[in-house]
Amino acid sequence: MALLEIHGLNKAFGGLQAVRDCSFHVEEGSITALIGPNGAGKTTAFNLISGVLRADSGRVIFRGEQIQHLPPHQITRRGMSRTFQISRNLEDLTVLENMIVQSPVHGWRGLLRRSMSAEERDRAMELLEFVGIAKLAHAETRDLSYGQKKLLDFASLLMSSPKLILLDEPAGGVNPALLESIMERITELNEQRGITFLIVEHNMELVMRISHSVVVMAYGSVIAQDAPDIVQNDPRVLQAYLGEVTL
Amino acid sequence: MATADVSVTDNRDTTTSSGYKSRKYILGVIVAALALVPVLQWQTTNNLNFWLNLLIIIFLWITMSTSWNIIGGYAGYISLGHNVFAAIGGYLAAMLLLRLDIPVFVTAPFAGLVAMVVGFVIGLITLRVRGPAFIISTIALVLVLRTIIDNWDFLGGVRGLTLPLIGLDVQLVKIPFYYAMLLVALLSIYFSYWIRHSKFGLGLRAISQDEIKAETAGIPTKMYKVLAYAASAFFIGVAGALWSQYVTFVDPGTYLIILFGARPVLMTLLGGKGTVAGPVVGAALVILATEFSESQFGGTELNVIGVGVVMIIVLLFFPDGLVGSLRRAGRLPALLDWD
């Protein structure tokens, strides 16, 4: 059953059609990779799905509900969380505060409550432990290394107990050890907690190892969606990455 | 299950740190001493009117700066037009006093509520933009209100409105205003402290750093900003109302000039934007520096230059304001660590 369905999504910036009649789906409980050459429209598609950008036309259906008209915070509340290509942690806040910001607030009374409950603190510490940066809980985020910021980005998403996580280039700029760690965490969350992932990624090792389905975009459109081993031999995909080959 | 809610920044051990333990007692003593100042005026033959007046002015600007800090400091939206809310409070209280003979001490909270409602409506419109566009919109707000009042005879036009003194002896006339302004300043500080340590405050701080990140984290940024803008208007409206009868005058040339709107910004930057104690420290320092400068150079432009030079020097050495820079350096005294 599809957790996320994209139907005929379009987005133009002036004369540039960044996303063109884009359609694909993400099965519940799957890890789906969204790949394509630079400028294919992957990040724009992410922004349209998560509400950061408003689509010119098309539909985004999440858990059976159309969400393309909703602002990002309402989409997050419905169970979809995302990271950005370049980590957008809140640099002047501590690591713990970055975690708590992601924790849902319930109603007016929740808004007026003190900034953190004991349960929230425990949960935040547990998640920081899960990604291995619990000892940095009270550090200022700006003092973290690039890799630690990536891990914080990842851990903070889990505070809102999402059903679907959108990761924009989680392997970008990380060393092999950290990449291995990130892949393990994604797999563990997917297998043990049933969280669905949609991942934009250029790292083919990550894509081929952990994803169940691969969506390929080129020039703003989806050109293929299938299992990884099928997609990697698809001539349309090879052409998109390598160009026209004549022998 | 009962939960112990805490502020997310409460990671220091407040139960064992003697600095933080004694902080509340020292602050209590300061507030008690401030509350006793008018008693000295009443009990002794010494004329303390100068000091009462100075403290009333400091309380006014603490209220202005602390309230401004909610939208400008916590949420990061720089408004140069918060004097509009002081004007709304001042004019409303003045009209109710002149037309219906209701004392400002009664109408001041109502004036604050009206300022807050107006702030909410204005926020819905102006907070659609950010950065320089928002700053310009707040200046435009001042100009629009000034043009309206200048040309509205019902509100006294450019001449303004003259209000009667309250019926007390000259030696006592400042005392009710002193206590009222002290109370408003203390409440505004507590309100700011409470917001800073609430979920709402954490959301505002997230907005100030990265609005898109805050929005994707699940924070309804538009609602937070509008609420912060309205909340920041309340105590300014109350203070504006009290100030109108304290100076027995309300006119556009006093309330609706750019300097009136810019002053809380400068005070907050000097003390530490986004901190609870910063606006309090900044307001007190600017007013004391201004008084000192006037006493040395008289009422000439030299005192304005003097205060400006002091501000430039302080901000060169303390770019995050006094409180912010001391915190970053790990040298902020526990007495001023309210964040």
Image: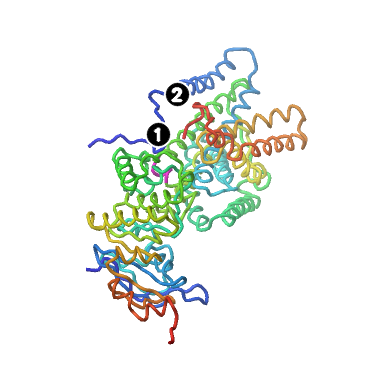
Query: Is residue A179 or residue A137 the one in the foreground?
Result: A179
Parent chain of label 2: B
Which residue is outermost to the bottom?
A247
Q: Nearer the viewer, residue B50 or A10?
A: A10
Asked whether residue B201 is drawn in magenta, I would say yes
Q: Which of marks 2 and 1 is nearer the N terminus?
A: 1
Amino acid at pointer 1: Asp
Chain letter for mark 1, please: B
For label 2, count other residues whose C-alpha is less than 10 Å away and answer few (under 14), some (14-19) or many (20+): few
* Quarter of the image that includes the N terminus of chain B: top left
Residue B3 vs residue B30, the one in the foreground: B3
Residue at image x 41%, y 52%? Answer: A150
Coordinates of residue B333 in the picture (x, y in percent): 52, 27
Percent x, y of residue A182: 34, 55
Residue picked out by circle 2? B24
The quadrant in which residue B130 appears is bottom right
User: For the stretch drawn in magenta, what is the main secondary structure?
Assistant: helix
Q: Are marks 2 and 1 on the same chain?
A: yes
User: Which amino acid is tagged 2?
Assistant: Lys
Secondary element at image label 2: helix
> Can you tell which quarter of the image residue A50 is in?
bottom left
Instruction: Residue A97: give its label.
Output: none
Rounded to the nearest whole Å, what is the CA distance between mark 2 and mark 1? 15 Å
Q: Give the range drawn in magenta.
A: B198-202
Q: Is residue B307 above or below residue B261?
A: above
